[in-house]
């Protein structure tokens, strides 16, 4: 075989294993070989479980030889953000406080992937308690961007973005509370899906903000995200917010053409103060979608700054409430920035928090009315490509909040509204850094985003480009 | 609605059971001030009967609408 298995997409490698063109062991060994080359420079993995994954791969190959295929992802090695509980495994949540925490249950989303036949490759780095948008981690060090190792990955799913981009894992679960899937996808040049609040069960996933947390995949292609979403979505008795009803055929949706669809470009906010390269790539993305037959119109959205502020208020209070016991007993065990941000929530009165929660339905209704004439909205994920690790290493300095706000200003409104958003690689800066665009949909209409994103990937190759080893 | 001052934040944090120093209270005031300002136009304006579960109702209505619209 001429190609490293780890360079294949998730969909392709699963098919290759099923057809016995690639063994699960070959796939796992290929990932391990590549991890050995990249991990010292990226710091993307929290744990690498070489012996365990090879043993699991051999078992998967043995089962397949006997005609026992566990599911659609039989024998595919995957690693996920280190916040998804797996019974018997240490789940650090990127923290010192949970450095030795052993989970006693397995998260629903992870269990569904295991039921489909995936095997565990290890676990991925992340921002401490998923509370950081850059990829810095005071305890385990920053995760590095494989396109330029002095640059940030974005966070909080920093290891997921870095490892998927460097082709160390075929895909990874992330989580998105304020942009934590879309920003690593944007900065690292991979595809990331922030799902509708309620689309995938959060049971057994470390909580940050119960009203905003969403589970979703980062992968090489839209098709891979569609595949993973289909496996993970649906009702769950362990999470009453996970909605009931049939799960759409997302893979079928991703094959549909987009001729005749209408895509909205915001008239303000998302197009303000953009780096010129991001503005150029937005224009080029819109032009490509137009060539594929989509109608492009301008949309006027309600005041997004109010949504950003509301998101910040809700997130700060809910995170502080989850962490209150440790804030009292172990404040010294948090990194400075995470401690500072958790303390922020202490200062927000209950009435203000509840007003932000009460307004959420009205704000969503206003947004849906504003986009009634379009199938999706396109916008940048962030106003800039990946900044350097040094310039964003602001700790708990007075500049910290402004750096965080600048990076997350295009993602937080979507979390407050609970909407789905798909980040797709859309181009590169002249300096070689990837830039993503987000497609924002209506509640539970991930299928539409996957349809548009897949059509874009059929006529572009940004998602196929991999960073080169030094 | 005005952004809380450091002195007020220190008192609120104390009541919450997590005492903070003057320096930390000052830092919190700087950090959350913009969120208070951004939300000021909404605060105190919401109708009496509006409750948080409205969000779920609107979300579910949107789901039903686009499911009907799908081919």
Image: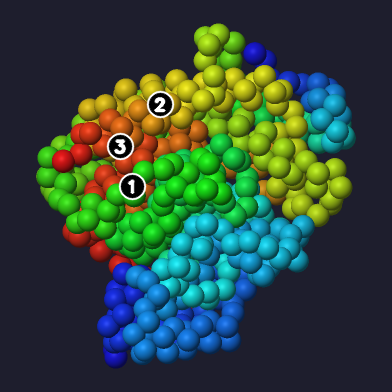
Q: Nearer the viewer, residue B6 or A31?
A: A31
Location of residue A104 with respect to A55 vertically, above or below: above
- Tell me the chain of label 1: A
Q: Are marks 3 and 2 on the same chain?
A: no
Q: Residues within 10 Å of mark 3 (few under 14, many from 20)?
A: many
Label 2, residues with CA under 10 Å away: few <14, some 14-19, many ≥20: some
| Label 1 crowd (10 A; few <14 / some 14-19 / many >=20) | few
Per the model, the C-alpha gap separating discs 3 and 2 is 19 Å
Q: Which residue is mark 2?
A: B58
Q: Position of residue A14 (x, y in %)?
A: 34, 75
Residue hosting label 3: A377
Q: Residue at the location (66% across, 36% down)?
A: A318
Q: Residue A463's quadrant in the figure?
A: bottom left
Q: For mark 2, give the secondary structure.
A: helix
Chain to which the residue tagged by mark 2 belongs: B
Which mark sits nearer the N-terminus, 1 or 3? 1
Instruction: Give the number of the mark in front: 1 or 2.
Output: 1
Location of residue A432 (image quadrant):
bottom left
Pointer 1 residue? A246
Name the element at disc 1. loop
């Amino acid at each position: 075989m001429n190609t490293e298995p780890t360079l294949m997409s998730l969909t392709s490698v699963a098919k290759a294993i099923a057809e016995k063109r690639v063994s699960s062991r070959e796939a796992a060994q290929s990932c391990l070989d590549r991890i050995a080359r990249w991990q010292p420079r990226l710091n993307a993995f929290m744990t690498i479980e070489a012996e365990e994954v090879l043993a699991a791969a051999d078992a998967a190959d043995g089962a397949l030889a006997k005609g026992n295929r566990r599911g659609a992802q039989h024998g595919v090695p995957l690693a996920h953000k280190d916040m998804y509980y797996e019974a018997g495994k240490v789940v650090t949540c990127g923290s010192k406080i949970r450095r030795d925490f052993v989970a006693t249950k397995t998260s629903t989303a992870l269990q569904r992937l295991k039921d489909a036949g995936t095997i565990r490759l290890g676990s991925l780095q992340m921002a401490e308690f998923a509370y950081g948008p850059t990829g810095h981690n005071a305890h385990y060090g920053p995760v590095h961007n494989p396109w330029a190792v002095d640059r940030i990955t974005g966070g909080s799913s920093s290891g997921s973005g870095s490892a998927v981009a460097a082709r160390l894992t075929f895909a990874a679960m992330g989580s998105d509370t304020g942009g934590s899937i879309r920003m690593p996808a944007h900065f690292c040049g991979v595809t990331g899906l922030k799902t509708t609040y309620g689309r995938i069960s959060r049971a057994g996933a470390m909580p940050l903000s119960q009203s905003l947390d969403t589970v979703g995949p980062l992968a090489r292609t839209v098709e891979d995200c569609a595949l993973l979403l289909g496996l993970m979505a649906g009702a769950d008795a362990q999470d009453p917010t996970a909605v009931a009803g049939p799960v759409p055929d997302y893979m079928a949706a991703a094959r549909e053409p987009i001729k005749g669809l209408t895509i909205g470009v915001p008239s303000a906010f998302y197009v303000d103060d953009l780096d010129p390269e991001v503005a150029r790539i937005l224009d080029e993305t819109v032009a490509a979608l137009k060539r594929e037959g989509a109608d492009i119109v301008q949309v006027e959205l309600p005041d997004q700054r109010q949504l950003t502020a509301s998101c910040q208020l809700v997130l700060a209070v809910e995170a502080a409430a989850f962490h209150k016991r440790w804030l009292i007993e172990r404040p010294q065990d948090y990194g400075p920035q995470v401690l500072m941000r958790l303390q922020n929530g202490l200062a927000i009165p209950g009435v203000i928090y509840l007003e932000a929660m009460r307004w959420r339905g009205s704000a969503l209704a206003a947004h849906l009315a504003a986009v009634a004439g379009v199938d999706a909205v396109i916008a940048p994920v962030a106003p800039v490509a990946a900044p350097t690790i040094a310039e964003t290493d602001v700790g708990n300095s007075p500049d910290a909040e402004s750096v965080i706000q600048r990076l997350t200003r295009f993602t937080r409104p979507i979390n407050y509204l609970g909407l789905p958003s798909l980040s797709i690689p859309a181009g590169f800066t002249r300096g070689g850094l990837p830039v993503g665009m987000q497609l924002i949909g209506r509640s539970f209409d991930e299928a539409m985003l996957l349809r548009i994103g897949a059509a874009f990937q059929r006529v572009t190759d940004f998602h196929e480009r991999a960073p080169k080893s030094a | 609605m005005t952004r809380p001052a450091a002195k007020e934040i220190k008192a609120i944090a104390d009541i919450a059971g997590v005492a903070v120093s003057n320096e930390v209270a000052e830092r919190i005031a700087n950090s959350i001030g913009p969120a208070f300002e951004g939300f000021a136009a909404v605060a105190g304006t919401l109708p009496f009967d509006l409750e948080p579960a409205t969000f779920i109702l609107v979300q579910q209505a949107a789901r039903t609408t686009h499911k009907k619209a799908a081919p």
